[in-house]
Amino acid sequence: MNLKSLLARPFANYIYNKTRKGMHTALEDQEMILKGLLKTGKNTIFGKDHQLTAVNSHQEFAAAVPVRDYEQLKPYINQIKEGKQNVLWNGKPIYLAKTSGTTSGVKYIPITKDSIPNHINTARNALLCYMAETGNAAFTTGKMIFLSGSPELERVGGIPTGRLSGIVNHHVPGYLRANQLPSYATNCIEDWETKLDQIVAETINKDMTLISGIPPWMQMYFDRLIEKSGKKVGELFPHFSVMVQGGVNFEPYKAKLFESIGRKVDTIELFPASEGFFAFQDSQEAEGLLLNTNSGIFFEFIPAGEIFQENPRRLSLKDVKVGENYALIINSNAGLWGYNIGDTVKFVSTDPYRIVVTGRIKHFISAFGEHVIGEEVEYALLKTAAETGMHITEFTVAPMIQQHEGKSYHEWFIEFEQVPADLEAFAEKVDRNLREKNVYYDDLIGGNILQTLRIRPVRKNGFIDYMRGIGKLGGQNKVPRLSNDRQIAEGLAGFTE
């Protein structure tokens, strides 16, 4: 054990114990955060527009501040981009995080002096909790990589602007800089495939101990390493022991990633976004991610079935129940108020408050009233894959609405590692598993309103080629699991077998 890992242990134990203590004060911490947000927010343009000086409780806050998505908050963001101060928070943001979805336009999310610790410290705390629980501090002595966006920043309204992962790159602690790969110059490469080749060149002969990123892009990195070296990743990097991942559900990628590694490594799951770092895996044993209840964010939860109603119930943390699906709403010291981030979560525990991410509000299929969500399609496919020994590279689902002859159905675009010999039987198993999970879908199939689902196999690297074609390859971009229209399905049609 070298000096760095030796010194890390006491700090890891301190953070671990502090995190455990915070589990028991979550409700009080949330109350204090709301009071603090209101104290600062009442002096902003937003606060005056919404009369925050008269707000003294969560109930009054919910009445004064409507739930908004980015488009509805955009007039305030535009004022920030024009150079105005005290718009959503004190002064001006220190950064604007530039982000875009697969189907939406560019968004500019403020990051303030008060909110930047939420992004930096939460990632640190996840690693330190892991270190304290497992005793593994050896990974701190080797090389670490985060597959991220470019750290080069432009200026919008005089504010440094770029991808969140690039912004965070500027805040890597000095004691980790020497361990960080790839080089700054490589991280600045915009073209993903050129960048990936350079990352492989810089890391293939290094002692990599921690690898972090979004699962599909880690898989691309692993594939290139295996192609170049002829070795499994775990053989190439014998001291590789920790894989940190987030951004999408890990389960669909897990089997193939571990197959590429060739052995078991520990994993740490994170729930970060440009809008805030919401939760992290604090334990290798417990299910779910610990909600970040004392880091500048006041959370609200709307029952998922009510999110599009005019006046949905807005629950605080004390009101949530295990097993129910909620739309996640945040209020933060970045100046985001009543902000619908678009994700749905489900509590697996309320002592402490641990969640799993179940999908996206806009990523669902209900073309026929079936209300199918991401969690359900992932369950159906992964259960079938486990039952049949199939490995799934990537997939997405869309409705196929028949205008004339024949009944409508769900169309699944799946990239298999190897297409099942009996694709029809595989599809029947997926359909059965989905019917087991979703009673509305079961009724539609049973009532002969919908046909059973159909699968269109996507050729090898078809999803990668599709993402390249729409300019979304690499970085933080990912393919939605399902959608209520045919836009992605039509784009993928040219990449099927």
Image (cartoon, rainbow, N blue to C red):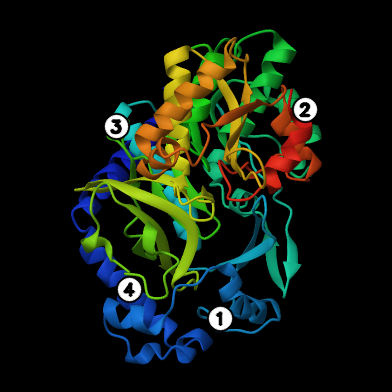
Q: Quadrant of the C terminus?
A: top right
Disc 3 to disc 1, how far (Cα)?
40 Å
Q: Tell me, yes or no, if residue 139 can be seen here.
A: no
Q: Which residue is mark 3?
A: 133
Q: Which mark is residue 34?
A: 4
> Could you tell whether 293 is left or right of 208 in the image?
left
Q: Which residue is mark 2?
A: 197
Secondary structure at badge 2 equals helix
The amino acid sitting under disc 1 is Gly
Disc 4 to disc 1, how far (Cα)?
19 Å
The one of 62 and 272 positioned closer to us in this rendering: 62
Q: Residues within 10 Å of mark 4 (few under 14, many from 20)?
A: many
Could you tell me if the residues under marks 3 and 2 are in contact, i.e. CB atoms within 8 Å?
no
Q: Which residue is mark 1?
A: 91
> Could you tell whether 340 is left or right of 154 in the image?
left
Q: What residue is at 27 percent from the left and 84 percent from the top? A: 56
Disc 3 to disc 2, how far (Cα)?
35 Å
> Could you tell whether 336 is left or right of 297 in the image?
right
**Above or below — where is 366 with respect to 431?**
below
Q: What residue is at 48 percent from the left and 42 percent from the top? A: 374
The amino acid sitting under disc 3 is Glu
The amino acid sitting under disc 2 is Asp
Disc 2 to disc 4, how far (Cα)?
46 Å
Secondary structure at badge 4 equals helix
